[in-house]
Structure formats: structure tokens, C-alpha cells
Amino acid sequence: MNQTNFITRKCTLKDSFIERAEHKLSKVYKLLGENATADVTVSSDNNEQKVEITAKNDSVTLRAEEVSDDRVEALDKAVDSLIRKIRKNKTRLERKIKGAPSIDSFFTEDAEKIYEETAYDIVREKRVQMKPQYVEEAILEMNLLGHNFYMFFNAETEEVNVIYKRKDGKYGLLMAEVL
């Protein structure tokens, strides 16, 4: 059963917006399957409307964020962005969804902690659940999340690595070396 969760920051949502979001997300749900969920975060700052969508199913997490002066326009762009990501990576996603064992979300919201000010100003922590992945899978997951870096457990080396996107559009791989 598909589920959509709405989170608001500094704004109130009208029923028409919620209905439109659920209708637009039905396209994403069709592509991700019946167990897909989506978190839609809507925030307002002055005249700027921001819509963030995180869609998940058992084996993949997708994220899109759009900003506009119109909330509905930002929603439409964010959903379109998710659909583009799915279509762009369709064959890889099909292999991942059908062939891979299911995984929970990589970033659990329950694990986030907000700390009081410290000497180093650490304001947030995340616990990351990892399954063994090949570098190519990690790059795909990073791109689907819309991040510039991604930490993963390398299936080949059995070590924790970080893949990152370079300014030239290529990718880099960080491997820890204990001194």
C-alpha cells in the first residue's frame, strides 16, 4: 500500500495541494511498486516555496528538491525530476529492485540527533545502514538520492568507502587507510 507523508515548515497546506501531490505521486508509485512511500516536505521562506520529495520502496531511495515562487510549480518540477531519474536509470533500477535483497532506508530519521552547541558545532548525526555494494551500485544510489557523496560498504574490498562527484563530472573513491 502506497503512503504519502506531508511535512510543513513555516506554511500550511491546502487540501487541493495535497490532492494534487497524491495524484502526481501516483505516477512515481506505479514505477516503484505497491510498497512505495513518499515524504513530501514543503517549506516557505519569504516568497520562495521549496518542495522536497523522498520516495522509497524496499530497495531504492530517490530524492528531489525544487524551489519556485509557486508551491504547485515546485511540486510539479520535483515529481518530474523523480520520474526523470527513474526513467534515466530504468534498466539499472529494474535489476536492483528485482534482483537485490531488500534494504531499509539508508538514512534513518530516528537516528538523527540535534545537539546543543559544542566546541566543534556538530549539529546533526545520522546512522547509516549499509549492505555490501559494488562501486557502480553506490554511484547509482548517490545519483538517485541527489547527493554529491555517498558512504557504502564495498562488496569487493569489504571496507567502508565513500564515492563522490567531482567538479569535472567524474567520480572519486575514498578508501580509508589506518596508520
Image (cartoon, rainbow, N blue to C red):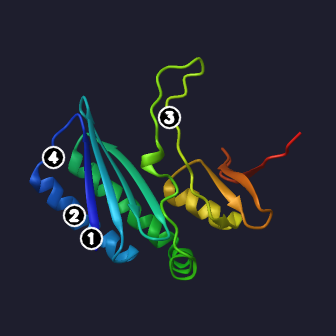
Cβ–Cβ under 8 Å for marks 3 and 2: no
Q: Residues within 10 Å of mark 4 (few under 14, many from 20)?
A: few
User: Which mark sits nearer the N-terminus, 3 or 4?
Assistant: 4
Instruction: Find residue 124 and name its label.
Output: 3
Q: Residues within 10 Å of mark 2 (few under 14, many from 20)?
A: some
| Helix, strand or loop under label 3 | loop
164 versus 113 height, above or below: below
- Residue reaching furthest to the left: 15
Which residue corresponds to mark 2? 22
Nearer to us in this view, 64 or 117: 117
User: Which mark sits nearer the N-terminus, 1 or 3?
Assistant: 1
User: Which mark sits nearer the N-terminus, 4 or 2?
Assistant: 4
Q: CA distance from mark 4 to mark 2?
A: 13 Å
177 versus 77 height, above or below: above
Task: Tell me the residue at 57%/77% (across/down).
Answer: 100
Task: Tell me the residue at 41%/54% (across/down).
Answer: 64
* 133 displayed left or right of 79: right
Instruction: Find residue 156 and name its label.
Output: none
On the rendered image, what quadrant is the C terminus found in?
top right
